[in-house]
């Protein structure tokens, strides 16, 4: 995906998250150090479940407990009862999620058909 398309996608995604927040259906959270965002995530919900979105920590701040703290803060702040995090089965983050109480529930697959020439530009 080109940088321009990726930027357009991210702008739309963040507008969608802002709309959810304005409706009281979730919030975006960030952890700061010296006025710099070092970790951030979204937490959005419906009447049944809250879903964490786009959990990120800057590389040089990983393995310091920042994401775990931010995940816990968001859960407490949201007052929701059931939470889900979708992640790669073999990714680095899955062990951290398990260490703070998340359990593997199910495997999700996705499939899409695209025109190679459109996405390669």
Image (spheres, helix red, strand yellow):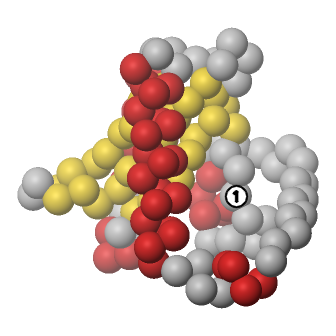
Kindly indicate the quadrant of the structure image that contains residue 81: top right
User: For the point 41% across and 33% down, which residue is it?
Assistant: 18
Q: Closest to the observer: 14 or 95?
A: 14
Asked if residue 39 lies left or right of residue 67, the reply is left
Classify the position of the N terminus by image quarter: bottom right
User: In what element is the residue under mark 1?
Assistant: loop
Q: Nearer the viewer, residue 13 or 76?
A: 13
Q: Is residue 111 left or right of residue 6?
A: right
Rendered image quadrant of residue 62? bottom left
Residue at position x 82%, y 49% in the image = 104
On-image quarter of the C terminus: bottom right
Q: Is residue 35 visible?
A: yes
Q: Which residue is mark 1?
A: 87
Q: What residue do we see at 17% from left, 59% from top?
A: 36
Instruction: Please state the horizontal and vertical placement of residue 118, each as a whole percent of the image.
Output: 69, 79
Q: Is residue 107 above or below residue 103?
A: below
| Disc 1: CA contacts within 10 A as few (<14), some (14-19) or many (>=20) | some
User: Residue sitting at 21 percent across and 51 percent down?
Assistant: 32
Image coords of residue 3 (percent x, y): 45, 78
Tally of numbered tags = 1
Observer-nearest of 36 and 73 = 36
């Amino acid at each position: 995906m080109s940088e321009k398309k990726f930027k357009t996608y991210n702008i739309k995604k963040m507008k969608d998250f802002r709309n959810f927040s304005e409706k009281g259906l979730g919030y975006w959270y960030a952890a700061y150090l010296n006025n710099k965002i070092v970790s951030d995530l979204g937490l959005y919900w419906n009447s049944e479940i809250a879903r964490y979105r786009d959990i990120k920590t800057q590389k040089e701040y990983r393995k310091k407990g920042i994401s775990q703290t931010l995940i816990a803060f968001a859960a407490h702040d949201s007052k929701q009862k059931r939470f889900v995090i979708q992640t790669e089965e073999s990714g680095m983050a899955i062990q951290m999620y398990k260490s703070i109480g998340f359990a593997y529930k199910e495997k999700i697959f996705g499939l899409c058909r695209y025109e190679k020439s459109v996405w390669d530009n």
